[in-house]
Image (tube, helix red, strand yellow):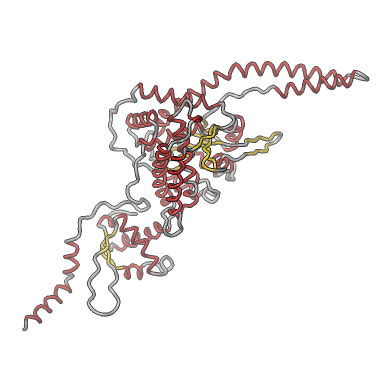
Amino acid sequence: MTTITTVRAADAILANLGAADQLAQLHQPAWETPAPLGQRGELPPFPVDALPSWVADHTRAVAEETQTPLDLAGCVALAALSTAAGGRAVVNVRGSWTEPVNLFVLVAMPPGSRKSAVFRGMTAPLLRAEKALADRVGPQITEAEVARRLAVDVAEKAARTASAARGEAAPEAVAEAQSAALTVEGIKVPVLPRLVADDITPETAASLLSEQGGRLAILSAEGGIFATLAGRYSGTPNLDLFLKGHAGDALIIDRRGRTERVDDAALTLGLAVQPEIIADIATMPGFRGKGLLGRILYSLPKSNIGYRRIDPPPVPEHVAARYDANLQQLTVGMHDWDDPARLLLSPDAAEVFTEHRRTTETRLRPHSGDLGHITDWAGKFDGAVMRIAGLLHLTAHVEDGWRRPISAETVHAAITLGQYFTAHALATFDAMGADPDVEAARTVHAWLHRTHTTRFTVREAFTALPRSRFRKVAELEPALDLLEQLGWIRREPDPPRTGPGRRPSPAYAVHPNLHQQGS
């Protein structure tokens, strides 16, 4: 047997044994832990340094004492700032474009995550400010109620006199009765200030919003408000208050015997819910179609349950005192602003924001942009950045923020927070099934898991998968790219051409973990 023949025989034997594939696998780098489907890598942590120092310090301290992720305390801090200033200021972005500074913020955390403790730590100054405002208004309420009762007595007496008057005395008596009635109408009894509500129906919230001059915050460590909005009690979804309360639109409510009107509604929403609520709200009637889901800033922090310190340090007294004093001062100082303060951008800040908007616009492109599938949320992203910038500005200048323009540094900080919420929004909407690429990747992932496939070619996958899902090979490629990006599969080097004809189909190795886990 010649040497050439011997080599060819050996090559044939090795080929039959799959030696090339085994050698390729031996030379492959070690597998890393894959990222969950629907989560494009590790989500960023809350950028606490973007907050003004007195808020950032308290946020860190509360997170440390409660042994919770910074995300929870940070997001509740933003909701607390929105409660303090929402409806009292707007950012004049450019031309006629203005943004109110109220936010809708939602954090998803599993049971046992100490959500209530964080809410107490971050919102307690609001309740103390509410009491201070009530104490201030209390004497005015008493005075107005007494004056009104006396005026009602006078008006009733004048009405009886006018009713009995005859002849020349009648016109004068009628005039006096009318004047007395107008006096009663002119005496307005102030309402007790109310900043925060928890478990509330949309109808009651609308009445409170009207009584409080169009401003109210719903802050809760539970997500029951969503079921209420979906019609748990009424049987009919009622989203108007929340849609208009976020946008700052006029709200007109006709009830039996009276009409309630709010010209510029400003509602704040700060919720901590269990993760399964995220999937539930996506299926609630009208929540996405009418735009409610697109108005919320989402946070999906990684749970640290099982890794918490048992005896962490408490919040330092000076940190808590500074936070309490400043948040109360901001709340009380802006409470009486009936005509919202207009916050302007400095020229440098306007330039920074313009460049940011250019970047956002490219991300909204239908096929190439990473935000193209969530335009209902991403279309409001730039506005949310401006709302955050307004809050950060007022927080950094508690005493006189309305007299100063918003700086470029503040806009940069707001963009940093916006980028955090964008990453978490992408993960949230992926969990809701909003991204077709993720859904396609789940289909491929399920096939690999079901069949215990350890290696496959694109042609084999296309043949095995349902044609109703993948009509062309090109429709399979984004799913494979995403699975590779997340670390579930790895493309093997293309084999060399052995002659004329079609190039061999690309091959992928499958992560061993896939057969021990679901998606």
Query: Where 209 falls versus 434 (above or below)?
Result: above
How many badges with numbers are in the image?
0
Query: Where 95 falls versus 174 (above or below)?
Result: below
Q: In terms of image quadrants, where is residue 276?
A: top left
Query: Where 446 falls versus 55 (above or below)?
Result: below
Query: Where 305 falls versus 444 (above or below)?
Result: above
Q: Position of residue 4 (x, y in %)?
A: 9, 81
Q: Quadrant of the C terminus?
A: bottom left
Taking depth in this image into account, of 162 and 53 the one nearest to the observer is 53
Question: Residue at horizontal 32%, vertical 70%?
Answer: 459
Question: Residue at horizontal 36%, vertical 41%?
Answer: 301
Question: Residue at horizontal 41%, vertical 54%?
Answer: 370
Taking depth in this image into account, of 124 and 179 the one nearest to the observer is 179
Taking depth in this image into account, of 185 and 164 the one nearest to the observer is 185
Q: In terms of image quadrants, where is residue 297?
A: top left
Q: Is residue 223 visible?
A: no
* Residue at the limit of the structure toward the right, as seen here: 167
Q: Position of residue 110 (x, y in %)?
A: 38, 40
Judge from the rendering whether residue 460 lies leftward or rightward of residue 419; answer left or right. left
Q: Quadrant of the N terminus?
A: bottom left
Q: Position of residue 423 (x, y in %)?
A: 39, 47
